[in-house]
Image: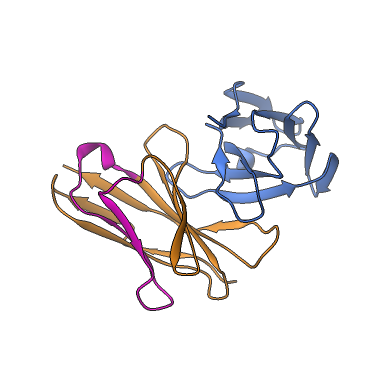
Amino acid sequence: EPEVTQTPSHQVTQMGQEVILRCVPISNHLYFYWYRQILGQKVEFLVSFYNNEISEKSEIFDDQFSVERPDGSNFTLKIRSTKLEDSAMYFCASRGGRGFSEAFFGQGTRLTVV
Amino acid sequence: QKEVEQNSGPLSVPEGAIASLNCTYSDRGSQSFFWYRQYSGKSPELIMFIYSNGDKEDGRFTAQLNKASQYVSLLIRDSQPSDSATYLCAVNAGANSKLTFGKGITLSVRP
């Protein structure tokens, strides 16, 4: 069964360092998302991406964040200068074609900023 | 601010009982409604989605939607200990728009 794959599963980084979280969405999906979940809190939307551009972003997604789909298969989230409060689970999700369809989530990357 | 509220919980039921999970949402423009299950440290896993008013059944799960009351619920019949998890309600306003999640309800099924 097709699945969304995220790497790494766990990343530890020092405050101020740049991190890149990687995702391989389901191959025929068109819509891509990043969400995050701080421990004990709700899943929060960060950004959506369609047709090689950002379609929507939340107030969390400030200038420190960026997304790319560099090669037509990978979908990356970059945090330029990590802060302690960026520590969270980051989930990538993808959704199929136009119309109603469910989002499938990857297994997540646990980011720990020390 | 568009909100999804899941205020009841944690919920504990005996094995074999019916578990009833409730969710309300503030955005009247919401069009589709999802229930995800999340085990600790894992990603959300889709259980059911519903678009139309009324009930939708899938095995032991029934989703109920009442758009006039802005209310969606999930019933789990014949609850099993393996159903113990956090259940997340999520809504979106359009076919491909973002999901807005509630904080989740933790269900514990006692053997």
Q: Residue furthest right?
A: B54
* Residue B26 drawn in magenta: no
Q: Position of residue B92 (x, y in %)?
A: 63, 45
Q: Left of B78 or right of it: where is A81?
A: left
Q: Which quadrant holds residue A39?
A: top left
Q: Nearer the viewer, residue B98 or B84?
A: B98
- Residue B85 in view in this figure: no
Q: Position of residue B47 (x, y in %)?
A: 67, 49
Q: Left of B7 or right of it: where is A63?
A: left
In the depicted structure, whether residue B6 falls above or below residue A85 = above
Q: Residue furthest bottom?
A: A71
Q: Residue placed at 56% from the left, 40% from the top?
A: B100
Magenta stretch? A61-88
Q: Which quadrant holds residue A101?
A: bottom right
Q: Which chain is orange?
A: A
Count all numbered tags in the image, as a single digit: 0
- Residue A104 in view in this figure: yes
Q: Left of A65 or right of it: where is B30?
A: right
In the depicted structure, whether residue A18 falls above or below residue B52 = below
Q: Which chain is blue?
A: B
Q: Residue placed at 73% from the left, 33% from the top?
A: B72
Q: Position of residue A96 (x, y in %)?
A: 62, 66
What kind of colouring is applied to the model shown?
by chain
Q: Residue placed at 57% from the left, 75% from the top?
A: A28
In the depicted structure, whether residue A27 falls above or below residue A42 = below
Q: Residue placed at 28% from the left, 42% from the top?
A: A87
Q: Position of residue A95 (x, y in %)?
A: 58, 62
* Residue A76 drawn in magenta: yes
Q: Nearer the viewer, residue B80 or B58?
A: B58
Q: Residue furthest top?
A: B8
Q: Left of A49 or right of it: where is B90?
A: right
